[in-house]
Amino acid sequence: MEKEVKDNYTVTAENSVGEVQIADEVVAIIAGIAATEVEGVASMAGNATKDLIQKLGRKSISKGIKVEILESVVTVFVSINIKYGYNIIEITRKVQEKVKNAIESMTGLTVSDVNVRVVGVDVSEEA
């Protein structure tokens, strides 16, 4: 039996008048904003297709973010570029904490994993 792939998740709340749906893209945007707020993160990194789309004018805050939601549990994959001179382990740990806290506090979903991949180092501001 194949899993159903969804583009959104329905939030169920007691005493609600209707239902609330949260799109996967919204969760990805929350994760992207949270990751870029960590000092030492130069930028998000995406795959070649997303990079090409961005260069053609469509910029996405969720660039470099992949979100998988199964029931009410979220797994996040984050690809980042870090600034030269920062400790990679420290920065990635802060990104994991910030992304997890942001998603859980804003959506009510449970984050099981935040997997961070460092794909580059930004040396443009090197002293």
Image (tube, helix red, strand yellow):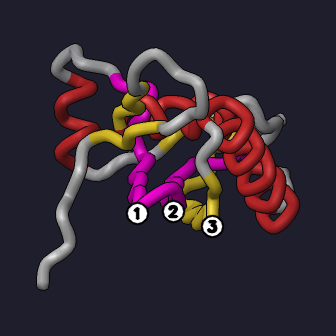
User: Which image quadrant: the N terminus?
Assistant: bottom left
Of circles 2 and 1, the one toward us is 1
Label number found at residue 70: 1
Question: Quick one: 94 or 22, which is closer to the camera?
Answer: 22
Q: Is residue 49 above or below residue 78?
A: above
Report helix, strand or loop for mark 3: strand
**Residue at position x 43%, y 30% from top?**
26
Identify which amino acid the numbered label 1 is placed on. Answer: Leu
The dominant secondary structure in magenta is: strand
Tag 2–tag 1 contact (CB < 8 Å): yes
Range of magenta residues: 60-84
Residue 66 in view, yes or no: yes
Give left or right: position of 120 versus 8: right
Give left or right: position of 31 versus 58: right
Residue 43 in view, yes or no: no
Question: Quick one: 30 or 88, which is closer to the camera?
Answer: 30
Q: Quadrant of residue 96?
A: bottom right
Identify which amino acid the numbered label 2 is placed on. Answer: Thr
> Is residue 65 in the magenta section?
yes
Residue behind mark 2: 75
Identify which amino acid the numbered label 3 is placed on. Answer: Ser
Q: Residues within 10 Å of mark 2 (few under 14, many from 20)?
A: some
Residue behind mark 3: 112
Of circles 3 and 1, the one toward us is 1
Q: Residues within 10 Å of mark 3 (few under 14, many from 20)?
A: few
Give left or right: position of 85 versus 17: right
CA gap between label 2 and label 1 equals 8 Å
N-term mark: 2 or 1: 1
N-term mark: 3 or 2: 2
The image shows residue 76 at horizontal and vertical percentages of 52, 57
